[in-house]
Image: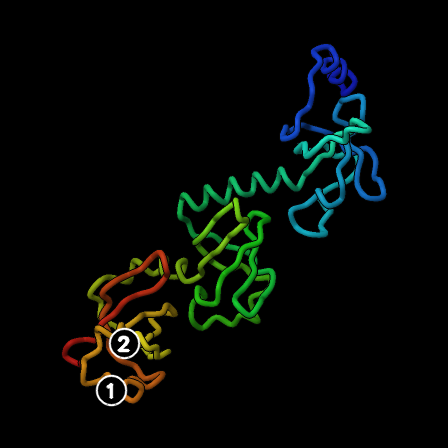
């Protein structure tokens, strides 16, 4: 017997199969309505795909058109019309998060597209899911204004599907790519970038390196800003590499301290 949607419907009726919310089914788009699409799923009643359930990306319906066959997530059932309400968005959301969780588990560097900027950082897209890179996790010397539309190397910091929370770090990706040239005990000349109550930051290949206050000789602490003027270079030694936060801990070279 040649397979058709009518034959499929006959089989469904024969075995009294009922579609359930949460099922994944195949269907073909056959009619565009004012607020959505009618989908032939081989049942007696056409299913309905609302416009807002088409894409994970807001206001993007470019990937749906008549006579195309897709897999759909059954979102709900209309009890009055006995019509199934379908979602492409929910299915793609589920599959996107499955891929994101796999990326997080493998702890790999990935290229993400920069979509927009805000005061606290940049908005990126990973597998059609919006993510956030805080300013504190951007490598030094990055011009945010030139990032929109480009791809940025990042690593996942937080991937929480339950709260739809996706946080990434560019610094971690940059640091990982430098690991072959960095090692504990390496002495390097680096400029001072920032003074904080808890220490001094240096720029080591565009990665922040913290000279903690406990590593600063006591005689320098009373006038720390004069002893560590911004942009001045000092020779520092790496004592810890924090891959998870994308930063270094350093001490002063002893013969210069």
Label 1 to label 2, Cα distance in Å? 24 Å
Q: Residue 64's x, y, as percent? A: 74, 41
Does residue 187 appear to the left or right of 96 in the view shown?
A: left
Give the residue at the far front of this rendering: 80
The residue under label 1 is 222
Residue under pointer 2: 189
Q: Residues within 10 Å of mark 2 (few under 14, many from 20)?
A: some
The secondary element bearing badge 2 is classed as strand
Left or right: 19 with respect to 144?
right
Question: In the displayed structure, would residue 248 be above or below residue 176?
Answer: below
Q: Nearer the viewer, residue 17 or 106?
A: 17
Identify the residue shown where x is 58% and y is 50%.
129
**SS of the residue at dot 1?**
loop
x and y percentages locating residue 237 in the rendered image: 22, 70
Is residue 144 placed above or below 224 in the rendered structure?
A: above
Label annotation for residue 187: none
6, 198: nearer the viewer: 198
Dot 1: within a 10 Å radius of its alpha carbon, few (fewer than 14), some, or many (20 or more) residues?
A: few
Quadrant placement of the C terminus: bottom left
Give the residue displayed 56% in from the left and 47% down from the top: 127
Q: Which residue is pictured at 66% across the width and 25% down the height?
A: 20
Q: Mark 1 vs mark 2: which is more N-terminal?
A: 2
Q: Quadrant of residue 33?
A: top right
Residue 151 on image: x %, y % = 54, 59
């Amino acid at each position: 017997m040649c397979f058709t949607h009518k034959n499929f419907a006959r089989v469904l009726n024969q075995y009294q199969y009922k579609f359930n919310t949460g099922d994944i089914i195949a269907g073909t788009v056959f009619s565009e309505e004012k607020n959505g699409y009618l989908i032939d799923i081989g049942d007696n009643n056409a299913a309905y795909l609302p416009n807002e359930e088409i894409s994970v990306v807001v206001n993007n319906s470019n990937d749906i058109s008549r006579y195309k066959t897709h897999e759909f997530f059954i979102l709900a059932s209309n009890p009055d019309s006995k019509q199934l309400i379908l979602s492409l968005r929910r299915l793609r959301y589920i599959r996107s998060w499955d891929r994101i969780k796999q990326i997080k588990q493998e702890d790999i560097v990935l290229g993400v597209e920069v979509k927009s900027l805000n005061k606290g950082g940049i908005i990126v897209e990973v597998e059609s899911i919006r993510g956030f890179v805080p300013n504190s996790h951007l490598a030094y010397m990055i011009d945010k204004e030139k990032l929109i539309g480009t791809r940025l190397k990042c690593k996942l910091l937080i991937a929480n599907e339950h709260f739809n929370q996706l946080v990434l770090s560019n610094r971690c990706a940059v640091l990982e790519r430098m690991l072959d040239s960095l090692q504990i005990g390496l002495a390097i000349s680096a400029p001072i970038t920032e003074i904080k109550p808890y220490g001094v930051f240096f720029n080591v290949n565009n990665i922040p390196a913290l000279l903690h206050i406990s590593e600063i000789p006591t005689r320098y602490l009373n006038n720390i800003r004069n002893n560590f003027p911004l942009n001045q270079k000092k020779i520092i030694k790496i004592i810890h590499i924090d891959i998870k936060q994308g930063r270094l801990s350093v001490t002063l070279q002893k013969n210069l301290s």
